[in-house]
Image (cartoon, rainbow, N blue to C red):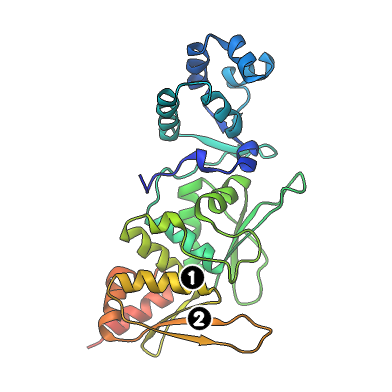
Amino acid sequence: MADKVSIFDFNKDNSRNIYLHGLNDILKEIFLSLGGPVKTSKQLGFKYTKTKEWLSGRKPISILDLRKVLRLLSFETSLSYIQRIDGSKLLLSCRYSSAKILIPKHIDADLAYLVGILMGDGSLSGSSLNKIGNWTIRAFFDNLQHQKIFDSILKAKFNVSPGFGDPPKGCTVSYCCSRVVHSFFTDLFEVCNGFKCDKIYVPNRIWKSDSKVQFAFIQGLFDSDGTFTKGSIKYSTTSKKMSGDVQKLLGANGFNFSVNVWIKDKKYLPLYTISIKSKKSKNLFYELINFRHPNKKFLLEKYIKAP
């Protein structure tokens, strides 16, 4: 199903470095069905001392090694275990971190909203070129209440309590350092690591989701890079692809809008601004999308409910 999230969607490099806790009972079952721990270890090409740690629960198994184990099974049996594992309450960790992370099992409105925020006023950084990696997820805010909304969703989805950094003047920042969370957003939702201004677009999983999830994603974008001023709802981005994707989503749901491209000079990227100006479309935005950002939500609601 389009709304499902699987641990097996992490890429090969991340699968090697992300570990699963609490699978020892399932692994015992699999190893027994394959002829026992010693025989299975030989089939895998691993020392029995390594697999023994997994079976006892003393050490977690990497996603990559788990894939190797499952490949020893028939297709149907492997698929049933994949579904069972994905349905379990799993804790994930990185090789060099003691923190154990939850990951969401389904794509819902709150998760889509987080992705929208990160596509807008967020940033991901990290590198596999060094041992620590510094895998960091940051989001910047101009409103403390809005920051609390983001933090509470991040906590609920990943069991992560964000830290608070030293941001540029006029804003606040929430951040967490976790390869698991970083990899979740890069691998499953195509959020860029590093410079992202003109590289963002609507992720494939959002396109495949229902309208409620798509609207929540757009809400995250508008809460980050959108405004409500002079009776006009606007969203601005330097990504031509994102601008086109948002236009497509809005147009498919009955919105009327205009698009303006502003080019300052060759030193700067073009800025694409989508403006929703008609009363009918602003009412539709209020009903289907709205803002979560407290100030923007207040202004739009005041406008909509004005006599």
Q: Residue 234: image x %, image y %?
A: 43, 81
> The disc labelled 2 sits on which kind of residue?
Tyr
Q: In this rendered view, identify the residue nearer to me: 236 or 262.
A: 262
- Residue lying at the far left of the rendered structure: 307
Above or below for 192 versus 306: above
Name the residue carrying label 1: 242
Q: Which mark is residue 272?
A: 2
Secondary structure found at label 1: helix
Task: Locate residue 57: give its quadrant.
Answer: top right
Q: Is residue 305 visible?
A: no
Q: Residue at x 39, y 46 (%)?
A: 106
Q: Residue 130: image x %, image y %?
A: 77, 47
Q: Residue 223: image x %, image y %?
A: 45, 71
Above or below for 267 versus 22: below
Q: Residue at x 25, y 82 (%)?
A: 280
Task: Locate residue 58: give its quadrant.
Answer: top right
Crowding at mark 1 (Cα within 10 Å: few <14, some 14-19, many 20+): many
> The disc labelled 1 sits on which kind of residue?
Met
Callout 1–callout 2 Cβ contact below 8 Å: yes
Mark 1 vs mark 2: which is more N-terminal?
Answer: 1
Crowding at mark 2 (Cα within 10 Å: few <14, some 14-19, many 20+): many
Q: In this rendered view, identify the residue nearer to me: 186 or 91.
A: 186
Q: Is residue 66 left or right of residue 300?
A: right
